[in-house]
Amino acid sequence: MKMTAVGGVVAALILALASTSFGQAVPVTPGSEERLAATRNSCSEKDIFHYTARRATGPIKVDGLLDEPDWQKAEKSPRFVDMATGEPAFFGTRAAAL
């Protein structure tokens, strides 16, 4: 019970700090979501990557192996980059979604 109460207090503090540190709320009107998201992320729409997630044709076994045919056909992201330098990441990490 104590951990739940402490967790609730911590969550409330985080929410209170977040609401005061980000300034005024911006009203969201229909059609303005993309523009608002780009403003919050400090980048333009053309700078935001978009990925395609295809529907799997059968069950996927969550085992860390990508040997199912659906994973073989899945579209992969470009290689990740180091956020500080913009250079390619140390490992050739890429993402795929189904």
Image (cartoon, rainbow, N blue to C red):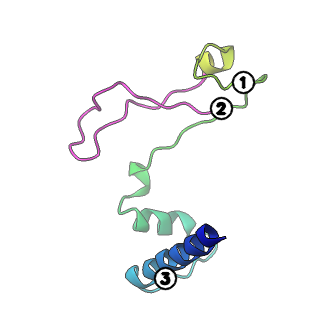
- The label shown at residue 16 is 3
Mark 2 or mark 3: which comes first in sequence?
A: 3
**Alpha-carbon span between mark 2 and mark 3:** 36 Å
Decide: few, some or many residues near mark 2? Use Cα within 10 Å; few <14, some 14-19, many ≥20: some
SS at badge 1: loop
For the residues labelled 1 and 2, say whether their Cβ atoms are less than 8 Å apart.
yes
Q: Position of residue 91 (x, y in %)?
A: 33, 26
Q: Is residue 32 above or below residue 73?
A: below
CA separation, marks 3 and 1?
41 Å
What crowding class fits label 1: few (fewer than 14 Cα within 10 Å), some (14-19), or many (20 or more)? some
Task: Identify the element where label 3 is drawn.
Answer: helix
Q: Is residue 64 above or below residue 38?
A: above
Res. 98 mark: 2
Contact check, label 2 and label 3, Cβ < 8 Å: no
Quick check: is 91 in the magenta stretch?
yes
Main secondary structure along the magenta-highlighted residues: loop
Compare residues 11 and 54 and report the one nearer the observer.
11
Horizontal side of residue 70 vs 86, given as left or right: right
Q: Is residue 86 magenta?
A: yes
